[in-house]
Amino acid sequence: MKIIACIKQVPDSEAKVKAEGGQVSWGDAPLVINPFDEYAVEGALQQKEATGGTVTALCVGPESAKEALKHALAMGADEAILVSDAALSDLDTVGAAKVLAAAIKKVGDADMVVFGRQTLDNGAGLTPPQTARLLGYPMLGLAGSIKVEGSAVTVERVLEEGRQIMKANLPAVLSVVQSIGEPRYPSFMGIRKASKANIPVWSLADLGISAPAVVVTRSELITPPTNTREVEMITGESPAEIAEKLADKIIAEKVL
Amino acid sequence: MDFELSEEQKVWQKIVHDFAEKELRPMAREVDEKEEFNWEAFRKAGPVGLAGMSIPEEYGGSNVDMISNAIAFEELGWGCGSTALAFTAHNGLGTSPIALYGSEELKKKWLPIVSSGKYKLGALALTEPGAGSDIQGGVTTRAEKDGDEWVINGAKMWNTNASIAEYIITLVRTDPKGGSKSLSMILVPTDAKGLSIAPAEKKMGLRGSPTHSVTYDNVRVPLGNLIGPEGRGLQQTLTTLDAGRISIGAISIGLARAAMEAAIQYAKDRKAFNQSLADFQAIQFKFANMEMEIELARTYIYKAAWLKEQGRPYSKEAAIAKLYATEMAERVIYDAIQIHGGYGYSREYGVERMYRDARLMTIGEGTSEIQRLVISRHVLA
Ligand SMILES: Cc1cc2nc3c(=O)[nH]c(=O)nc-3n(C[C@H](O)[C@H](O)[C@H](O)COP(=O)(O)OP(=O)(O)OC[C@H]3O[C@@H](n4cnc5c(N)ncnc54)[C@H](O)[C@@H]3O)c2cc1C
Ligand SMILES: Cc1cc2nc3c(=O)[nH]c(=O)nc-3n(C[C@H](O)[C@H](O)[C@H](O)COP(=O)(O)OP(=O)(O)OC[C@H]3O[C@@H](n4cnc5c(N)ncnc54)[C@H](O)[C@@H]3O)c2cc1C
């Protein structure tokens, strides 16, 4: 089975977003593999272990995103491909899906394309279904477990309302959630392999497409109003007295 | 000169740090109190390469360079002293003699098993009830040839991992006449008949790392279980300990760093005389000393590791690194407890455990006195 795991590089979860002069930036926060995509790589590797085949990690991003791909290689992915082009500076999810779909076609013969449920920076979770749509593959989102039998894949979707079993023919696009299992640690052997790996960089010309037009733009940037909180210590002679005062307060504030 | 870690080493540091933070640190107090080995961490260590650091890739190991080894043990020590000690007794003592000196047959049979993390660990038994520092003169455990077997009789003391090991590499006297060519290493599977492993010693610290006395009563193993040539046991031991000292030093740095981090947090939060502890110069200067000592210890550990990687002599440097790092850790953690005031003396706060854990480091794998002996011999040679 040929599996493609799509990953993105994002700012570390401790990064502070800044909006200044109409520009959003993450400052100089360290960049990491999108934590949700680590589950995608984990899910892909599990399928490789179950049925054989290869895992290709695919990323659209700047040259620095090679580090995220190396993380996937160190976890056990067989190869990695970066799509990078100066014309891709302002990608929305539709644009990312167009580029990914073209790259997936260029890789060729994919049986399964696995995504994380969303990114840590934008958090839309739209790229997986949009990519599926462009490829004409069925979309199985929010998979908590994956089982491949013959040319079909069955997933258990983890939804707010409960669990849902869905089956589709391969090739298919999947997005996975945490129930897939904790992402494995990269290994020293993997790091060694990754540091020697030659990661090809494909341009838009290599994919035979031009830069996708932007469909989502930011019309205005506003910094959210700061929340001010006041703390009032309730004191009294005895616990009973304190409790009584507290109860009065709660009723007065109409909390209950 | 180049003080920069390679890209590979930086990534490795981050991964082992993550591993220590998720798998070791949350369990550190519990393994100490319950005196239980953290099996789950060992199971997970296999695939990461932390159970085969001294083992070539062809036998399932990760064969990390010595600087990466030091990096890993600092992080593991930062996470949990007990688990770090068990891991170093496994990697450095329990597997490297086989990887370095073992026959192809022994390597094929044992190394893939112990590097996988799926089974048990390795152990090395040098110390005896009557002999610790003086290995050459003191070892009385005997091995005699009988047909195609070794017959081993004697007793070992302070054996880390014995009860959680697949085998114990045992330093035995093969020539009763004594001398520097009278000792050999023999691999003894822990299920061998006549081998008894006593219940774990009740220790001051490192209580999540079991240590045992072991007795050998006519234990028979095949002649092929000899590791390296007969009579080379002392030299093999000294080489193994040189490398082991770098790991023990690195664990000490990790313990010191963990204690310092805890003290920094505490000093910033705790108020006395209307300011935070961190605002007192008396406290600030303690941190300055801690930082200085940790940095110096790490730099020197890396130097010793680098020399080994270059294939250059590093015995003196390993002794200096171990001596300084282990004694430094005691000073740093002493101060970390001091900064915590009464709370530092409580088991609620990790610094008390780190202090107990660090205490062994100036004793195991060559006491501070033995390190001074090694250094002075080089100086006066
Ligand atoms: C938790 C723990 C784990 C251990 N794990 C292992 C293990 O896995 N395998 C193993 O083989 N051993 C292990 N040991 C044993 C350890 O290596 C020895 O305790 C150590 O080598 C010291 O030996 P000893 O205890 O016999 O002390 P001794 O050698 O009796 O030394 C006692 C004191 O005398 C000093 N001394 C000795 N000779 C000299 C000298 N020539 N000049 C000056 N001072 C000297 C020593 O420095 C020390 O202060 C472990 C010990 C502990 C506590
Ligand atoms: C086993 C045990 C038994 C005890 N028994 C009793 C008891 O019976 N009765 C009782 O009342 N108390 C008792 N104590 C409490 C003990 O007296 C206090 O722990 C001690 O006075 C230190 O106070 P602290 O822990 O609040 O530390 P802190 O006062 O918070 O001090 C923390 C650190 O800051 C340093 N520091 C504080 N102020 C300054 C300054 N101005 N300049 C420089 N450094 C400063 C301290 O030296 C220390 O290193 C006991 C404690 C223990 C651990």
Image: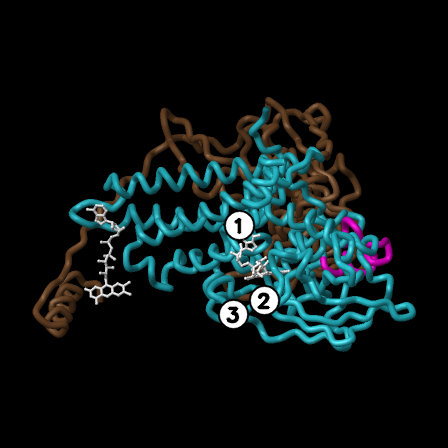
Chain colours: A brown, B cyan
Instruction: Name the mark nearer the viewer: 1 or 2.
Output: 1
Disc 3 designates what residue?
B35
Dividing the image into 4 quarters, which one contains the C terminus of chain A?
bottom left
> Which numbered dot is residue B322?
none
| Residue at (71, 71) in percent of width and height | B154
Does mark 2 have its CB less than 8 Å from ligand 1?
A: yes
State the separation of the CA atoms marked 2 and 3: 11 Å
| Residue at (48, 36) in percent of width and height | B296
User: What amino acid is labelled 2 in the image?
Assistant: Thr
Please tell me whether mark 1 sits on a helix, a strand or a loop.
Answer: helix
User: What amino acid is labelled 1 in the image?
Assistant: Glu
On screen, residue B378 versus residue B287, left or right, reads right
User: What amino acid is labelled 3 in the image?
Assistant: Glu
Q: Position of residue B295 (x, y in %)?
A: 46, 37
Q: Position of residue B358 (x, y in %)?
A: 47, 55
Q: Chain of mark 1?
A: B
When asked about the image quadrant of residue A153, the answer is bottom right
Q: Main secondary structure of the magenta part?
A: helix
The magenta-colored residue range is B98-114
Does mark 3 have its CB less than 8 Å from ligand 1?
A: no
Please tell me whether mark 2 sits on a helix, a strand or a loop.
Answer: strand
> Which numbered dot is residue B369?
1
B102 drawn magenta: yes
> Which numbered dot is residue B211?
2
